[in-house]
Amino acid sequence: MHRTLLGIALAAGILGATTTPATADTPDPAPLSCEGQTIDTSAPIHYRTEALIKAPLDTVWNLQTDVEHWPAWQPPVATVQRLDSGPLQPGSSFHWTTPVPASASTPATTLGITSTVQQVVDRQCLRWTGPAVGDGLNIEGGTHVWTFTAVADGVLVQTEENWRGAQVEADISTSTGFLGMGLEAWLTDLRHAVEH
């Protein structure tokens, strides 16, 4: 599970990221994968986006995978605690928090997210899963996939995530919108951190 809801959406400066929405004339692209594993494609809430970041692959990868330092470059991330040590690997876990303001259906809360790495290929891809829980807000499970591809102008970073849970599935359109804004903000923050 990752990058969530209105607090993150409000922090978004969505310049420069591109989405890959399907239209009636174009089929959905194959889901992003890491070691052949994707998001939960049966989940009703999912979003995919990408951005070209003009920086070396090592720089982008190292910033993204140094999860304990996310708060230094992602304003919506309040805290991060690694639950193990060393480089991210399958089984690595981290707990992080982000404030979420009140909405029409949920109170203001701090969302606690526990992410567990399922797959990682050095400088190529990451996939993690986990729940997000706050007072009055619960995302029972999510899967987040990241891919990193060196290209002529830098790194093409692609990300895709899904959410599950009765509360977020009660309003799929709104939840998908919040998820999308959060992912767009994440890419914007990542680009800004490595390009400036």
Image (cartoon, rainbow, N blue to C red):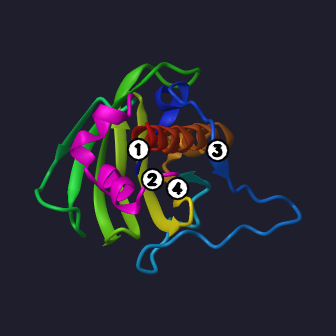
Q: Residue 162 carries which label?
A: 4
Most prominent secondary structure in the magenta stretch?
helix
Rendered view: 191 above or below 159: above
Q: Mark 2 points at which residue?
A: 55
Closer-to-camera residue (25/134):
25
- Point 45% across, 61% down: residue: 146
Label 3, secondary structure: give it: helix
Q: Earlier in the sequence, mark 2 or mark 4?
A: 2
Q: Quadrant of residue 90?
A: bottom left
Q: Label 2 is placed on what type of residue?
A: Ala
Q: Which mark is residue 172?
A: 3
Q: Position of residue 113 (x, y in %)?
A: 32, 43
Give the residues in magenta.
54-75
* Mark-to-mark CA distance, 2 and 3: 35 Å
- Point 57% across, 54% down: residue: 52
Rendered view: 115 above or below 135: below
* Mark-to-mark CA distance, 4 and 1: 26 Å
Q: Which of marks 4 and 1 is nearer the N terminus?
A: 4
Q: Are marks 1 and 2 in contact (CB under 8 Å)?
A: yes
Q: Residue 86 carries which label?
A: none
Q: Name the residue under label 1.
A: 194
